[in-house]
Amino acid sequence: MKEFFKKWIRAIRAPFFTASAVPVFVGTALAWNMTGKFSLGRFILVLVGVPLFNAGTNLANDYYDHKTGNDEANSNLTPFSGGSRVIQDGLIPAKQILVGSFLFFGLGSIVGLYLNAVTPGNLVLYLGIFGLLTGFFYTAAPVLIGYRGVGELVVGLNLGTLAIIGSYFVQAHSVSWSAFWISLPIGFLVAAILYINQFPDYEADKAVNKRHLVVRLGKRRAVYGYYVLIAATYLVIGGSVLFRMVTPFALASFLTLPLAIGAVRILKSNYDKIAELIPAQAKTVQTHLLTGLLLSLGLVVGRVV
């Protein structure tokens, strides 16, 4: 039983669920900051539901990247990229991975339908449908979102803007421009995680015509895209404070700027290497997590003060 759970935890890439938990914290903290409303039960349900969709997406991606031969062609593996490899290592049959994807999407849908039933309107339903379809068809034919150069946008939208607006709405029962603006930095950073992970995958992705932005631009020029994502993150946070969309305590998130600059410097020097790039991948994940947590903390402190 222990080995069974270990295999599936690896398959769903559970250690990386921080990408789906962070926007829930930010959206919930902003709702409390602006309206004083907070439901622990709804917060927990969203905190469970979003990662369930994330797990379904990860499994679908593993299955369809296996079907296209993408993961089999990838020999430049890192702890952050190249898929879970459970199919390639013979740990879980491909068909079970696909069934698991349906199961996690189904469980996430149950959570979403309940949340939709206890909140006004159908915004949660619409967000859930969009998240499910774009998650499944990220690598599934005929849509193949991740193969068409818009994957970074869709991932940033799902685990940034839509997740934060949804988390905010579940608590506040309203929408807010502040939720939109503060969602952008989180979206930029989760897109940056995906983006930097595409550098080691470049050769394999190019071989199967997976034409995301790094493949389209080439590694050398694609470095500037990462710069843009990092710079936009802090510019939007600063602008949101400057224009009084969020509390000044949100500037606590700028404490992660040295970490982000470290990732930029490593990528600049090692964009065409594999092992040397791993620290930049790690710093990008850490920047996303800590920026989101500090932003959430700032929003909470702003309400208390």
Image (cartoon, rainbow, N blue to C red):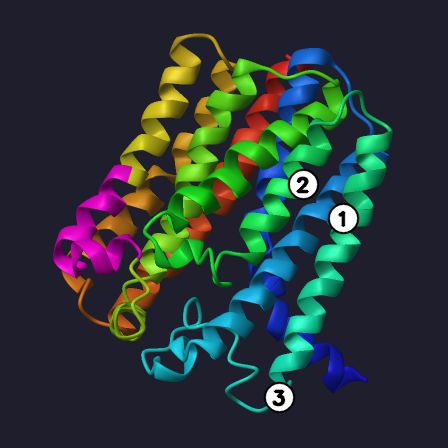
For the C terminus, which image quadrant? top right
Secondary structure found at label 3: loop
Residue linked to disc 1: 109
Q: Is residue 195 visible?
A: yes
Please check the rendered image and state whether residue 8 is part of the magenta-colored stretch, yes or no: no
Label located before the other in sequence (2 or 3): 3
Find the residue positioned furthest to the bottom.
90
- Based on the displayed image, in which of its 4 quarters is residue 59 positioned? bottom right
For the N terminus, which image quadrant? bottom right
Residue type of the residue flagged with mark 1: Ser
Residue type of the residue flagged with mark 3: Leu
Residue type of the residue flagged with mark 2: Gly
Q: Are marks 1 and 3 in contact (CB under 8 Å)?
A: no
Label located before the other in sequence (2 or 1): 1
Q: Position of residue 297 (x, y in %)?
A: 59, 30
Secondary structure found at label 1: helix
225 left or right, relative to 60: left
Residue linked to disc 3: 91
Residue linked to disc 2: 128
Compared with residue 28, is residue 201 higher up or lower down, i.e. above or below? below
Q: Mark 2 vs mark 3: give the one in front.
A: 2
Label located before the other in sequence (1 or 3): 3
Please check the rendered image and state whether residue 217 is part of the magenta-colored stretch, yes or no: yes
Q: Magenta stretch? A: 212-228
Residue found 59% across the figure and 15% down from its top: 176
Find the residue positioned furthest to the front.
142
Residue found 39% across the figure and 76% down from its top: 70
Residue found 13% across the figure and 52% down from its top: 221
